[in-house]
Image (cartoon, rainbow, N blue to C red):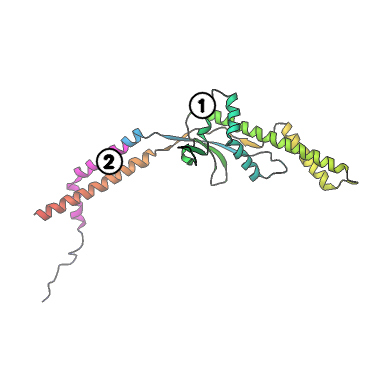
Amino acid sequence: MPDIRPPYDDEIDLFDLFAILWDGKRLIAAFVLVFALFGGGYLLVKEPVYESKLNYAPDTLPPFYDSGRVALDFQKMFYSQSRFDHWKNVNKTSLIAFEDFSKIVIEDGFTLAKEENKQRAILTSGKNGEAFILVRSNQLPLLDELFRYANYINQLLQDSYALRAMAELKLIETRAKDLVAVDNAIIQNILVIDRYLAAIETGANVFAINRPTMPKKTEPKSVVILALSVVFGGMIGVFAVLLRNAFRKRKA
C-alpha cells in the first residue's frame, strides 16, 4: 500500500517563515544598518556632479543657410581651439580652459576622442529638440563665463554671415548690370539679403542664447543609493536568517 502524504507537505508555511524572520529581525536590522552605512559613506566620499543648461535657438538665420547648417557652424566654432585662445587672450582671468570642453585628449602622445562625461561643457540636445550647452559645474562665475564665450562665438558667426551676405549681394548686383531686364527672382534675392543685413544692423543675432539655469545635482542620487542600500541589506539579512535556520535544522 503506497504511503499517503499529508496535503501541502511540500508547500512553505508562510506563518512559519514569518516567525523565522521575526526571530531573526535583529540580524536583518544589522545587515540593513551596515549596508545603509556603506551607502552613506559612499555619498560622503563621492564628489557630487552638478549640471546647468544654456539653452539656445535660431533667431535670425542667413538667407543662404538652413538651421542645420547654422547649428553645425556654431558647433565647429565653439570647439575651435584657435577661437577659444583668442577669447582667452582677452579674458585672461577666466576660470575655463579649452580642455573643459575639448572633444579630444592626448594620452601617451596619441590623440584620442574624449568621453562626453569627462567634458565640462558640451553642445547637445534634448528629447523635445531643444538645443543647449550642458555644463557640469555649480560654479556661477564659470557658468557666466561660458555664457559670454557662447555669445562671443555667436557674434563671430554673425560677422561671418554678414560678410557672406554682402559678398552675395555684390555678386547679384554685378550680374544684374549685365542683364537687359532684371527678373523678379533676382529682385527677391536682393530684398531678402537686404532685410537680413538690416536685421543684423539693428542687433539681431544668429542664435538667441539664454542665461544658464541654476545648477542641479545629478550625481550621486542620494535617495536612490540609500534606498538600494537598505533593500539590498534587507535581502542579505533575510538570506542570512534563512541560512542560519537551515543549519540549525540540519544539526537538530
Q: Residue at x 19, y 48 (%)?
A: 22
Q: Nearer the viewer, residue 60 or 74?
A: 74
Horizontal placement of 229 versus 64: left or right? Answer: left
**Mark 2 sits on what residue?**
35
Horizontal placement of 168 versus 101: left or right? Answer: right
Q: Quadrant of residue 174 in the image?
A: top right
SS class, disc 1: loop
> Which numbered circle lies on residue 199?
none
SS class, disc 2: helix
* Span highlighted in magenta in the image: 13-40
Q: Nearer the viewer, residue 99 or 117?
A: 99
* Rendering coords of residue 214 (x, y %): 50, 32
Q: Residue at x 16, y 50 (%)?
A: 244
Q: Residue at x 57, y 33 (%)?
A: 81
Tell me whether circle 2 and circle 1 mark residues in contact (CB < 8 Å). Answer: no
Image quadrant in which the N terminus is located: bottom left
Magenta-drawn stretch, dominant element (helix, strand or loop): helix
Q: Amino acid at mark 2?
A: Phe
Circle 1 packing at 10 Å, graded few (<14), some (14-19), many (20+), is: few
Circle 2 packing at 10 Å, graded few (<14), some (14-19), many (20+), is: many
Q: Amino acid at mark 1?
A: Leu
The Cα–Cα distance between marks 2 and 1, rounded to whole angstroms, is: 39 Å
**Mark 1 sits on what residue?**
95
* Rendering coords of residue 141 (x, y %): 52, 26
Identify the residue at the far top of this view.
93
Foreground disc of the pair 2, 1: 1
